[in-house]
Amino acid sequence: MAPIDPRGSVGVASFLEAENFRQGTLNMIKSMMFARLRNAAQFVLVVLGGLFIGHAAAQAQQFSADIVMQREAATAQAGRLRVLDSKVRMETPEFADGFFLIDAATPTAYFVRPGARIYMDARQSSRLTQLLIPVDPAAPCRQWQVMAHLAGVVEQGGWRCQRTGEGVIDGRQTIVFRAVSGSGQVYVAWIDRERKFPLRIKADDGMVIAVENIRDEKQSAASFELPPALRKFSPEALIERIKQSDVWVAGETDKARP
C-alpha cells in the first residue's frame, strides 16, 4: 500500500478531518468553561444579593423625635420618643418618674419606674402607647387593634382603615388613612412610608398628635429593654393580697354590723 501523500486528496481529507476534530474539541472546552464561569458568576451574584438583603434587613429603623399635642390654636410639648425597629421608648411629662417601653411585635407595653425598681402593664394610662407605634403602611389598623386589645379597651368590633390619599408632612411622603376603632372613634392618620410610623394623627375630638423634629440616629438596644432586677407590679395582685389581709376582713366585718 502506497504511503499517503499529505498533499493528495486523501491527505487533505484526513488533515481537514483532524482539524475539524481539533476545532470541535476546542469549542466544546470553551463552551464548558463559559458555562462554568456563568454558573460561578450567578453564584457570586446570589451570594452578594443575599448579603445585601441581609445587610438591609440588619439596618433597623432607628430615630428619635418630639411628641406634640395640638388643639385648635394651642400647641404643647407632650414628650419624646425613640424608635428601634418594632420597639418604642416614650417619655411624657405626665409620668415624669418613668418611661414607657412598647414592642409592637411582641406585643407588650410597660410603664417602667426605675426609682421604685418596678414596672407594670401600661394599660390605658396613655393612648399614645396605643397609637404611636410602628405600623404597616398599607394596613395600619391591624397593629392599632392589637395594642388597643392589649390595653384592655372594650370594643364592639375590629378596627377599620380606609386609604384616602397621600400627603407630605415636614417633607416626608405619607399615606393618609381614615381609621375607625372598634369603639367607634374616628382618626385621620398620616403614615410615613419609609419609617412605617404615624407622623400625625387627628382624633374626632379635634386633638392632633404630631411627631416632629425627627432625627435619624442610632439607638442603643439596651434603652429598649427592661432594666435588670426590676419586679413587676400588678394592681390586681395587690388588691387580692389586701382582700386576704386582716385589714380587709376587719373592714368587711364592720360593714356587716347593723
Image: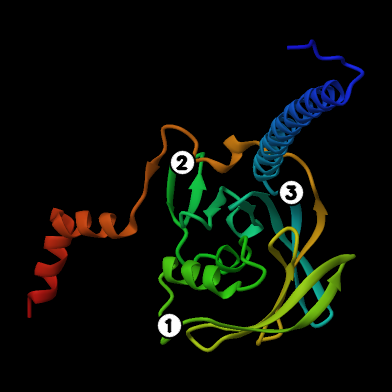
- In depth, the one of 61 and 181 nearer the eye is 61
Q: Secondary structure at mark 1?
A: loop
99 relative to 165, above or below: above
What amino acid type is highlighted by mark number 1? Glu
| Location of residue 243 in the rendering, given as x and y in whole percent from the top left corner | 18, 60
- In depth, the one of 71 and 138 nearer the eye is 138
Q: Report, in whole angstroms, how far the alpha carbon at label 2 lies from the one at label 1.
A: 33 Å
224 relative to 258, above or below: above
What amino acid type is highlighted by mark number 2? Ala
Return the mark for residue 63: 3
Image-quadrant location for residue 51: top right
Q: Which one is in front in this view, the residue at disc 2 or the one at disc 3?
A: 3
Return the mark for residue 116: 2
Image-quadrant location for residue 255: bottom left
Q: Report, in whole angstroms, how far the alpha carbon at label 2 lies from the one at label 3.
A: 28 Å
Q: Earlier in the sequence, mark 3 or mark 1?
A: 3
Left or right of residue 133, residue 230 in this image: left
4 relative to 27, above or below: above
Residue farthest right in this picture: 7
Report crowding for label 1: few under 14, some 14 to 19, many 20 or more residues within 10 A (C-alpha).
some
84 relative to 149, above or below: above
Q: Which residue does the numbered mark 1 point to in the structure image?
A: 155
Q: Report, in whole angstroms, how far the alpha carbon at label 3 lies from the one at label 1.
A: 32 Å
Q: Tags 2 and 1 in contact by the CB under 8 Å rule?
A: no
Q: Secondary structure at mark 3?
A: strand
Q: Which one is in front in this view, the residue at disc 2 or the one at disc 1?
A: 1
Left or right of residue 169, residue 181 in this image: left
What amino acid type is highlighted by mark number 3? Phe
| Location of residue 114 in the rendering, given as x and y in whole percent from the top left corner | 51, 40
